[in-house]
Amino acid sequence: MLTSGIIVLSGGLLDPNPGLIFWTTVTFLIVLFILKKFTWGPMLSALEEREKGIQNSIDRAQTAKEEAEAVLNKNRQLLAQAGADADKIIREGKEYGDKLKAEITEKAHLEATRMIASAKDEIEQEKRRALTELRTEVADLAVKGAEKIIMANLDAEKQKNIVESMIQELSQNRN
Amino acid sequence: MKRFNAIRIGELVRIAVLVMPLLLGFGAPIYAAAEVHGEAGTHEAAAVHADEVHGEAGEHAEGGAGDVIMHHILDSNAMEFEPFGKFPLPKIVIGGFDLSITRHVVFMWLAALILLLVFGYVGNKYKSIKSNEAPGGVANAMEALVEFIRLDVAKSNIGEGYEKHMPYLLTVFVFILVLNLLGLIPYGASATGNINVTLTLAVFTFFITQVSAIKSNGIKGYLAHLTAGTHWALWIIMIPIEVIGLFTKPFALTIRLFANMTAGHIVILSLIFISFILKSYIVAVFVSVPFSIFIYMLEIFVSFLQAFIFTMLSALFIGLASAHEGHEAEGAH
């Protein structure tokens, strides 16, 4: 009748079977060696090769990326440098221009001052000469005028009266 | 439309009425008996002999369930294709050892043949393929499997030097897997459900483990590990414990695979036999068949799982023996 329990205990399921062990060993070893030689070897080496290839590709991509980044950085640096240079040049130009402007202005100023001073001097001289001239002229004119007036006002009667009166006065005073 | 529906419903009711008695198991003992015997030709014949068969057959079905199950699971000296016939296998005895070709040996050879065909083809593909070409079809499928064993089983458990264990791990995986799956086809048998087979495979793992332990630690380190680094006074306790520990691992491997495969088959067969024991078609339709289909699906999964676990644990034991134990022994000194 039943049951599996009795069968297990009586050695059905756990029955040692040297024949089966022998055949398992033989079969397994044969399969192992044949597969090892014909399948696992080529397969594993192919897998490894591919893995290496992929790793290489990744490495190369990484290197390329790094290079590109380096180039980009360099470009950026150059650009920044160029900008800085341009700034510097502009600043220097401006400074130079400013300096030049200041110099020119100063020079012009000095020149103007000098010119004004010399003009003033000249004017002064001219004025003085003119005044001298004027003075002589005026003196001549005055003398001429006076001469004319004197000539016009010279009256014998009157002169005689004046002289007489003066003599009279003088005589009175002596008295 | 309505009329058509009415006709259809009427027909369905009629069919249900006809089938109901069958389902409710009026004639069940006859059919059950007929099927258990596997030789009662037609229903008519069975019906004629119904009465005389009834008493004996019922008893036989109940009593025979365990025997049939055991017969199915155990090894035998014949290939059985039930209704078609039975082919005896040769009995070979050499030097007192029984080296007969049994059913499980035949299935092992069948598995070996399948493996050699499939993987021979795949290996050939790989020989002709260039490194920058992608494999296709079967080669690609097998590559996924190999890659899985290589990375997730071998590399992560053994670590450095895993390459030289790869052929063993791969072979043991596919060998066990095919043996497991062969048990699920009609007339098939799982050689992995036989403790002798699993024991042999576990012994391979055991030898590889010990050899790699000796190789990586040296004989001295290997023997030193057996003392677990304790004081010499404790050696009399420690050495037997460590030696037992060595044998526990392959023992666990043996029993795990064997018990899992055997249990799956016993569960499927038991579920089928429920309907014969209860003599009911209702049980057969609503319990036995759906449940055994479910367990069958589970068994497909378990076939993969157990092959994976055996490989995984083999890798783990090899890894422990070759690397970790070395450090432990060094640390203990």
Image: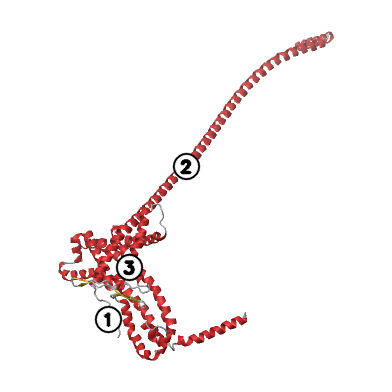
Q: In front: mark 3 or mark 2?
A: 3
Element class at badge 1 = helix
Amino acid type, callout 3: Leu
Q: Which residue is mark 2?
A: A75
Foreground of the two, A85 or A166: A85
Note whether A59 is above or below B18 in the view shown.
Answer: above
State which quarter of the image contains the N terminus of chain A.
bottom left
Along the viewing direction, whichever of A58 and B291 lies nearer the viewer: B291
Residue that numbered label 3 is attached to: B110
Where is residue B153, by image quadrant?
bottom left
Dots 3 and 2: beta carbons under 8 Å?
no
Give the residue at x 62% y 24%. A116
Instruction: In this rendered view, identify the residue nearer to me: A123 or B22.
Output: B22
Amino acid at pointer 2: Asn
Distance, label 2 to label 1, CA atoms, is: 85 Å
Compared with residue A158, is residue A15 higher up or lower down, i.e. above or below?
below
The amino acid pointed to by label 1 is: Ile
Res. B116 in view: yes
